[in-house]
Amino acid sequence: MIFPNPYAKEPESYHSKSGLILHVTKASKLILILFLINLTIISNTEPTEKNESNANEKFDNYENKPNLNNNQNSNNSNTNNIYNNNDNNHQQRQEKQEKNILVLVFPGGKSHNFVMKELFDFSMKNSKNFKYNYHILVHNWDKDFWTNYQQVYKILGFGDIPQFDLIFKSALDLVRKDPIFGYTKFNRAMIHILDQFMQSGLLEGALRQTNFDMIMTDIPNFLFKFLRSELKIKLALHLSPPALPNLFYNLFEINAATLPALGTPFTDDLGFFQRLQNNVFILGMKIMFKVFMGEQSQVFKNYGYSYSDSDVFVYDAMILIQYPLGFCFSISKPSNMVFLNYITPKNAKELEDKEISAFLDKHEKNIYLSQGTIIKNINFAKILGIFGHFAKQKIGFVLSIKKEVSDKHIFPENVFLTDWVNQNDLLGDNRIHLFITHSGINSVLEAIYHEKPVIALGVSMDQVNTAGVVKARETGIVFTSAAQITPQNLIPAIEKTLEENNVYLSNTKKYAKILKANEQATDVYNYWLEYGFQVGYEHLIVKAYSRYSFMEINNFDVGLFVLLLTLFVLYLIKRIFACIFCYGINNNKVKLD
């Protein structure tokens, strides 16, 4: 900046009459220009309140991320409604770009379909820049979930339902009993699923006829990678409902000291022998996947496609995992891996089922029990005595189980049987005091959201891992083996979790606050979906994971080099000392001679 000199002599024109007139004229023109500019600014300026709202919106967006016109947290919808008219006018002026998204859903997991639909629905209603067309590729066993939404989603079904029950579900049961060697049958079941897709004709039919902008799936699988290659789809995204970063073990630096392996009940406080076991499990999982994935990729060759990739992982994909911060274990992760908060929990409505409501009124305390949709953990023949034991204490049980299971047994009067219930609303009812769950992540998160302690019966796959988190956070009592699910164990566990002001209840209230303080999963999903279509994901990828071999990514080659170099240096030191010793002996001999 140049500062004026106070001692400098003023120009002559300031003191002359003509100079004064000249400057008055210039000043008049300047005032007129400023007046016109001011009118323009006033006419184009929004009210002060809106400017403040826009400023607040910048703070609501993620730190260091570009502004993609992302909606604010749904809890702030009342504030946003003030400007709905302006937003609608803007949307009418700017036509949305259409984006076709191909979605593959892992067969047999009803909860996966439900969770993904929650996010899809939100993105279609709240995207300001794009119109999303979701094409759902799903096994016919799960297709009935989507049939009610065919006006919104394009559904592509394949596979034989009776064969699925016979082959795939029995394979899941075997994995539950034997997670290691049981995987051989599960691998054959996956090959059967791939065969059925290839026989369906969908690839050369409906799929070839659509130009897809993105492909999406829930867990790593070969069909996802194969279709992306065949259909030449640019963007890839993993949307994983289970809280399992360890499923993506080749896409980030999985540390056996901080993250339990798939199917292990460990917490994030691992002792030496637990870390040793965890390392063995993780290494075994990598070897097992390497062996079996080669067999699965062979299916596409059998149908005449030149596909030779035996690695199931897509290294340039964006990864969104339902893994709520503050509740699940904290781990380091790459930029393309984002953790979502809870998806299914929400404020409960009044129970619509009047029969259940009347049943709850009859008892002083009530317990809700559900087995989930994939794997059945409870042998009711072994635990029937539990229900009668608590009948005298006026404790009721609401059991959400399939009719083919309930018809096999006779239950006492303090048990209400149903094959379906709105779980979120039931857990939000003050008359429910405890939840006995199969330990699926959605069920556990709904229980915590509504401040209900759990008894987690996690006996296989991701259920065991979720039970480990429940144990670490002390939001309930955990059983991770089918042999532990007995009246001798369950009765004292129920009594302990029903005590007034017990530790599990207080911890559940603590983590409910943490969950509700996190960013909404729907907003985060919508943000990263738009982010991908606007700027892509490639710049977020850690290139080393795909560039380096197994030896290089784990620095085994560097360790081997350091070991060899150390041995060489030790060898040189040994030779030097040997020479010095020999030299000393020779000198002594010379002196003696």
Image (spheres, rainbow, N blue to C red):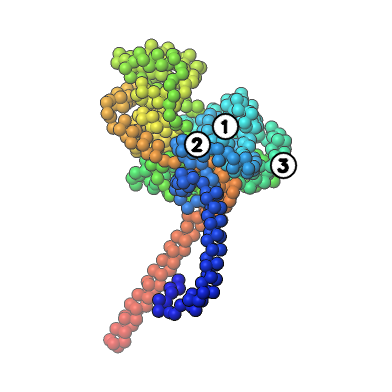
From the image, tell me which residue sits under label 3.
304
Residue 478 shows in the view: yes
Up-down: is 70 above or below 550? above
**Residue drawn 69% across and 32% down?**
200
| In the image: residue 177, left or right of residue 235 | left
- In space, the residues marked 1 and 2 are separated at their CA atoms by 39 Å
The one nearer the camera, 462 or 350, is: 350
Residue that numbered label 1 is attached to: 107
In the foreground, 587 or 26 = 26
Mark 3 or mark 2: name the one nearer the start of the chain.
2
The residue wearing badge 2 is 81
The C terminus: image quadrant:
bottom left
Which of the two discs, 3 and 2, sits closer to the camera?
A: 2
Neighbour class for label 3 at 10 Å: few (<14), some, many (≥20)?
A: few
Q: Amino acid at mark 2?
A: Asn
> What residue is shown at x 48% (from left), y 14% (from top)?
407
Mark 1 / mark 2, whichever is N-terminal: 2
Q: Is residue 474 visible?
A: no
Going by the numbered disc 1, the residue's amino acid type is Pro
Secondary element at tag 3:
loop
Q: Do the residues bearing badges 1 and 2 touch, measured as CB atoms within 8 Å?
A: no
Mark 2 secondary-structure assignment = helix
Mark-to-mark CA distance, 3 and 2? 55 Å
Point out residue 244 in the picture as x, y percentages from the top left corner. Answer: 47, 40
On screen, 6 above or below 431? Answer: below
Q: Relative to 101, does residue 361 appear above or below in the rendering?
A: above
